[in-house]
Amino acid sequence: MKKESKNLSRRSFLKSSALAGTIGVIGGGATGLLSSCSSGNKKSGNIPLREPGSYYIPDLPDLADDGKELKAGVIGCGGRGSGAAMDFLNSANGVTIIALGDVFEERINTLADSLKAEKNIDIPSDMRFVGLDAYKQVIDSGVDVVIDCTPPFFRPSHFEYAIEKNKHCFIEKPMCVDAVGYRKIVATAKQAKAKNLTVVTGTIRHHQRSYVESYKQIMDGAIGEITGGVVYYNVGQLWYRERQPEWNDLEYMLKDWVNWRWLSGDHIVEQHFHSLDAYIWLTGLKPVSALGFGSRHRRVTGDQFDNFSTDFVMDNGAHLHSMCRQINGCTNNVSNFIQGTKGSWTGKGAVGGEVFIKDLAGNVVWEFDEEADKANNKQTNPFVLEHVNMVNCIRKNTPIEQASEAAVTNMAAIMARESAYTGLETTWEGMTASSLDYTPADLSLTGKMDMSAFVTPIPGTGKK
């Protein structure tokens, strides 16, 4: 196929070119139609970054294979927990939810009502557990799978207890907010692997077909050796809760959790995680240092920043620029860009969007055809496909452990955040060994928090 001029727009390119469709098989499962202007990477002289078979490719059919019944318990029944519950139920036949846990009873009852109305699943009152220790009761209730979507601060302890009790896990990202939590995640992940337990994290890019196919292309050397990149998660203000007179300090913070750094890790950890994860996973690189800055301009509640910019140095010497923002009225951009010696890869959009590779002259030489994916596959939602993969791994006794991989991205985000808070460069070695611990002095639901301790960091002052 004749290559297009670099001055020709992508839209014109798509309209004027008769793109050759090739079928991309994802791990022997569902297929997506790919457009390519080359006859194959091997013939074009690509040198693989990693040999096929040396890295994990998920099997992503529309529905998990039938098999033994799996009973799940949901910990954290807010918006994300309710969504994950439905995603799990939509991923396979023969799966159900038998227990719910949350700090707030009203959230449990709301999810229970939805399960009854949408899935005809009854959660009896004695399987609805309320309080900060509800996670233990859910895990001990006879479940096979734990779905943990609590605020990130709590996830390391929940994960640790679930693996101690030999449960398969879906743990939403991020998995921790500080260095102490990171080390607990890494240690627990090793135990999960030793016990042959499946652990899937909320790293949806790993179960998004366009990104999985991109991973295979990049590992096969399609853009050459990695030399740099830029990742963005610039969006508007996220949700917040105004304090009500009847709420005590901890109750208020838990209901407004996404705005408090001890609970969420700040938005660079809680949301921008996805963009950082895309780069770290697709390149196989790990940060060795981070130097960043950020500030708080218009955030309404909480004690975190609303923007960050970070320069990472990766372990091959390449630089990654990371940018994230949650401010209304600004230009939004959720995308990822990777530069290589032979070309570049771009992925646009939070879920879905254009995904393509260009050569050094700016010609599109490969792209994922999302419309063909929709035409060839009934299930294209990565939030469901991650549960499809989890169920298949459990039923086929081919366990995967994604927590240790997710922990690398998690720590990268923590490095960037702490650099912005302090104004100082952080390093991988320093942060992973750090005593950084965001645990408040009082975690009692009936006690009073010391709200004076929750102040927005000021770089350069030596205080956080």
Image (tube, rainbow, N blue to C red):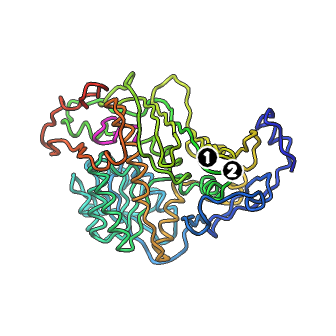
**Left or right: where does residue 45 sit relative to residue 187?**
right
Which residue, given by chain and number where applicable, does mark 2 sit on?
370
Residue 116 visible at all: no
- Tell me where residue 341 appears, x and y as whole percent: 66, 46
Residue at the farthest left position: 447
Q: Amino acid at mark 2?
A: Glu
Secondary structure beneath label 2: helix
Foreground pick, 328 / 102: 328
Relative image position of residue 411 (x, y in whole percent): 38, 47
Question: Which residue has dot 1 on it?
Answer: 352
The residue that appears at 77% across and 42% down in the rendered structure is 363
Q: Is residue 5 left or right of residue 233?
A: right
Magenta part, dominant SS: helix
User: Is residue 401 rendered magenta in the image?
Assistant: no
Q: What range of the chain is rendered magenta?
A: 258-269
Residue 130 lies, with reference to residue 142, above or below; the image says: above
